[in-house]
Amino acid sequence: MPQSVQLLMRTASLLFLGMTLAVSIFAQRPTAPLDEWKALDISLSQKSMKSVHPQNGFVPDEATAVKVAVAIAVAQWGEKVIAEELPFKGRLRGDVWTVKGTLHPQGALGGTAVIQVSKSTGAILFAVHQY
């Protein structure tokens, strides 16, 4: 085969290879990043993922119960109303924390927020504002 034909075939082969490479590079579009919430859902769905179960429950003491209850009360009745009922106190009976605000002045007519929270799970069991 003449040298000029070999050179032409080599050039054509290189050109074809270059075009193929260029097309494959441009054909690959970058994938969108995985949404962080979708990634979290995937992670949490793994069988090896286990939740913590605190020995003393998610709400182990009065201070924690009060924080949880006040957060719920503010979300329901507003910061202004709940600020007037501070301080909040809690009492544990069995697995249920009952948390209530303080009526000002003492003995006045009216009521306060009352929230019940599960010691073991942290679930809100009951919420009312007594008037």
Image (cartoon, grey):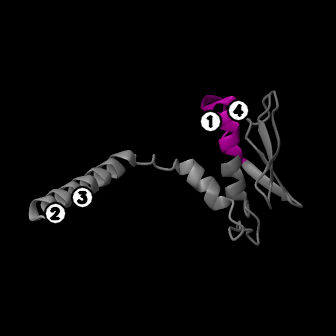
Q: Residue furthest left?
A: 4
Residue 112's place in the image compared with 48, above or below, is above
At 16% from the left edge and 63% from the top edge, which residue is drawn? 6
| Picture quadrant of residue 119 | bottom right
Would you say 7 lies left or right of 101 here? left
> Which one is earlier in the sequence, the residue at label 4 or at label 1?
4
- Residue wearing tag 4: 76
Query: What's the magenta region?
Result: 69-88
- Point out which mark residue 6 bears: 2
Q: Are marks 2 and 3 in contact (CB under 8 Å)?
A: no
Q: Are marks 3 and 4 in contact (CB under 8 Å)?
A: no
| Picture quadrant of residue 14 | bottom left
What amino acid does circle 2 point to?
Gln
Alpha-carbon span between mark 1 and mark 3:
80 Å
- Residue wearing tag 1: 83
Placement of the C terminus among the 4 image quadrants: top right
